[in-house]
Amino acid sequence: MNERHYARNLLGLGRGKGGAIRSFLDRFAPGQRVNLLENPTEELIHDLARGRQPRLFGMAGNGGDAVLGRIEENYLYSTRRFPLNTTNNTIGAGAVAAQDYLYFTMGLGDQGGSAGYFSIANLTLQQTNMASGGKIPNGRGFRLFDLGVTFNAQAIGTDIAQMLDITNMRFEKQNSTLVVQHGPIKLWPGGTGIYGYAATTVAATSLQAASNGMPALTNVRRFKSPRTLSANDQFQYVLNCASATPNSNTTVALGSFVEVTIWLFGQVLDKIAN
């Protein structure tokens, strides 16, 4: 019984009935197993330039052993609390230390203090859905198309504004072998949360607004080529914070705790048959 593997970068060819990919697979004789594989071009170039064996990912198959796993759409997310205060829950006006803050390096059950939470002994699904920090587990893979940054619903508007102005984001993979600078987080709206205006006085003589993009998924930044994370890939996102606002060079002073979440949305592959 012949088994053939085809590697292609295929875009817009359709996998459903009547699509080019389906028609291609239907040309093979019954019992002839075919795997159609793919990988983003930038990933192939990156691996080949460093003498690595390219990693390929299942795109389609005609049954039998060609079934690579179950694909679902879901989020991959990680949350931290600012300022980094692990001694109490009362801060008044809290300064944000100028340093790197790591995301996706903490998994379920890790100590809450590692993400700035004094009152949470261990991280739960409220903070992250990483099974283990910093690494994709065996039997799982991700093809991620959307990236957003969100804040907790109770965050104060002026605190959100300060965090948007002082924070830059970058992506690192395989122990910083690949580094992508994403720039200020205000370039990556979350598309979720509270949006609107609130009166700051009883007479409503002044208004306060807070937003990181209108709450709609159409307002989220989307990758044209998905970011692929394979089993055992090591990765992290990093938020680098400055200690002073750029326009007035004044020290950052949050009025209350702020939770900042980085989330990615796309396809999750589990090695479980459909």
Image (cartoon, helix red, strand yellow):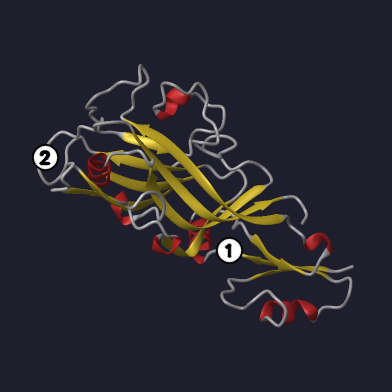
- The amino acid beneath tag 1 is Asn
Mark 2 Cα-neighbour bin, 10 Å: few <14, some 14–19, many ≥20: few
Which mark lies nearer to you, 2 or 1?
2
Is the residue 112 above or below the residue 238 in the image? above
The amino acid at mark 2 is Asn
Locate the C terminus and report the quarter of the image it occupies. Answer: bottom right
Residue 227 rendering spot, x and y as whole percentages: 50, 57
Q: Residue furthest toward the front?
A: 203
Look at 34% across and 47% down and name the residue there: 169
Name the residue at 47% across, 25% down: 112
Q: Residue at x 34, y 41 (%)?
A: 239
Q: Earlier in the sequence, mark 2 or mark 1?
A: 1
* Count of number-bearing discs: 2
Lateral position of residue 103 relative to residue 96, left or right = right
Residue topped by disc 2: 249
Query: Where in the figure is residue 124, as x and y percent of width and height?
Result: 54, 31
Q: Quick check: 183 above or below 81? A: below
Describe the element under mark 1 as helix, strand or loop.
loop
Query: In this view, which residue lies farthest toward the left?
Result: 248
Left or right of 46 in this view: 254: left
The answer to whether residue 211 shows anywhere in this view is yes
Q: Quadrant of residue 218?
A: bottom left
Q: Which mark is residue 39?
A: 1
Q: Would you say 21 lies left or right of 91 here?
A: right
Which picture quadrant has residue 233?
A: top right
